Amino acid sequence: MSAGRKIFLNSAFRAAAHVNSSTIPKELAKTSAAFLSSAPAGGKHTLPDLAYDYNALEPIISAETMEIHHSKHHNTYVTNLNVGLEKLDAAVSNGDMSSIIGLQGALKFNGGGHLNHTLFWENLAPSNGNKLLDGPLKGLINSCFGDFESMKKQMSADTIAVQGSGWGWLGFNTKTGRIEVATCPNQDPLEATTGLVPLFGVDVWEHAYYVDYRNVRPDYVSAIWDLINWDTVEMRLSKAMKD
Amino acid sequence: SFRKDIIYFFKVTTMKFAATLSTLFLASASAWSMSSTDNPSTKNARRNILSKGIAFAATAAAGSAANAYVVPDLPYPFEALEPYIDTPTMKIHHDKHHATYVANINKAREGKEEVPILDLMADALDAGTAVRNSGGGHYNHAFFWSEMAPHDKAKNTKPSKQLAELIKKSFGSEEEMKKQFEAKAAPGATFGSGWVWVVVNQKGDGLSIVNTANQDNPLMKGILEEGVMFPILGLDVWEHAYYLKYQNRRPEYVSSWW
């Protein structure tokens, strides 16, 4: 077995929980090669099930959007990621550096797409007055932004302002211990791109809101705050602070 | 007056062209455009079509004093491109998306000298994100509307002799050009939001297929590795261009549009 293959398999075992977990183990995010071949034992990534029905996020996000977004868009990223990883394994086995490098774009698109959407589904929940309770997250938001409303205003503005396709994120900076707002283009994953640990993301590719909001992205971004699953966000923060 | 527009275009971009290039533009523009329009109120739009976006830049710029740029009227009704592009998409794409770009470029150019939108393209990267995104968006969409026609009319148009020769020389055949275009427009090749173009090089002796991200276009300095090139055909592959009818099935949209 080649050295390269050994590295991948080691990472794969560490990443076995990845498919349904909300954060990527730090080692994986930083080692792109390990992440890119982080297929669980069995070798294939799979589309994660949602924790709620397609219609559970209505009327803010319609069942139609959820079904297409999950079963078509996200599913396509998963499928293409698996295809790319197979090609990567073959290229690594053959020591084909040129192909390894050539695959990076497709792996970033599809791996990022799979990762981002997995995080997204988990940081959404049916609207039932989801509120941010007092706790470490609220404290950190207050100290970094002044108050919740200010954070919401900045993140909304930055997310709406994304040119073309991309994501808005609230992220944790492990170096400074602060939380920040960030945006990434296309499917570029937050941690690999900026080093911030994702706390929650908002998809502003047009496919995320076109059926329900047409071109009015601001209405979608404003409405989606009612769907944020603060329990998940809180959990991601405490994990990030521990690591 | 069309000839004047061509000369103006050359001056604006400060490049030298062989006489053959201007003939190429004339020929390709009329060959790829509608043969006629039934809508009398779009006389300006008709000029737009015939000049492949060159003259439209002048007419689009000749709006009211307060707003330099206006959304050009479509040269056909919203439903005219069915079933290839659906009516709701045409309505929203033209009345909302394109209109937003026009509103934003007007805002960005407030208090500045009124120039045709074409003039803003070459230095768009230096001019800042508003000009690049909203100016580019305005130019690209005006270009887009003018190059399409209802299928009944479109099917009776074909490339001029010169354009056909250039296609043959650059791609081998129209089929091969279409194949390369569709490959470039695939979701894995043009990722996220952007446009795919057939462009002619500065010498005027070769065509190629390129893609640009967001609202960039081949006229902008610094976008294409090969330098500025001139679009003769472009396709919007932002999701808003096809989502209502095709959802995630971009390849179906591209092949159907062709």
Image (cartoon, rainbow, N blue to C red):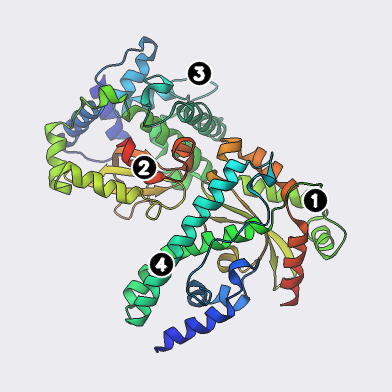
Rendering quarter of residue B79: top left
Q: Amino acid at mark 3?
A: Ser
Q: Amino acid at mark 2?
A: Glu
Task: Report the Cα–Cα distance between label 1 and label 3.
Answer: 49 Å
- Is A180 left, or right, of A9 in this rendering? right
Q: Quadrant of the N terminus of chain A?
A: bottom left
Q: Position of residue B107 (x, y in %)?
A: 57, 32
Q: Which residue is mark 3?
A: B64
Q: Nearer the viewer, residue B166 or B83?
A: B83
Q: Which residue is mark 4?
A: A84
Q: Nearer the viewer, mark 1 or mark 3?
A: 1
Q: Nearer the viewer, residue A121 or A148?
A: A121
> Mark 1 or mark 4: which comes first in sequence?
4
Q: Nearer the viewer, residue A15 or A180?
A: A15
Labels 4 and 3 positioned on one and the same chain: no
Q: The residue tagged with tag 2: helix, strand or loop? A: helix
Rendering quarter of residue A63: top right
Task: Report the Cα–Cα distance between label 2 and label 3.
Answer: 40 Å
Letter of the chain that mark 3 sits on in the rendering: B
Is residue A169 among the parts visible in the rendering? Answer: no
> Mark 2 or mark 3: which comes first in sequence?
3
Cβ atoms under marks 4 and 3 closer than 8 Å: no
Q: Residue at x 82, y 47 (%)?
A: A129
Task: Work out whether A199 lies above or below A24.
Answer: above
Cβ atoms under marks 1 and 2 closer than 8 Å: no
Q: The residue tagged with tag 3: helix, strand or loop? A: loop
Task: Report the Cα–Cα distance between label 1 and label 2.
Answer: 40 Å
Q: Which mark is residue B252?
A: 2
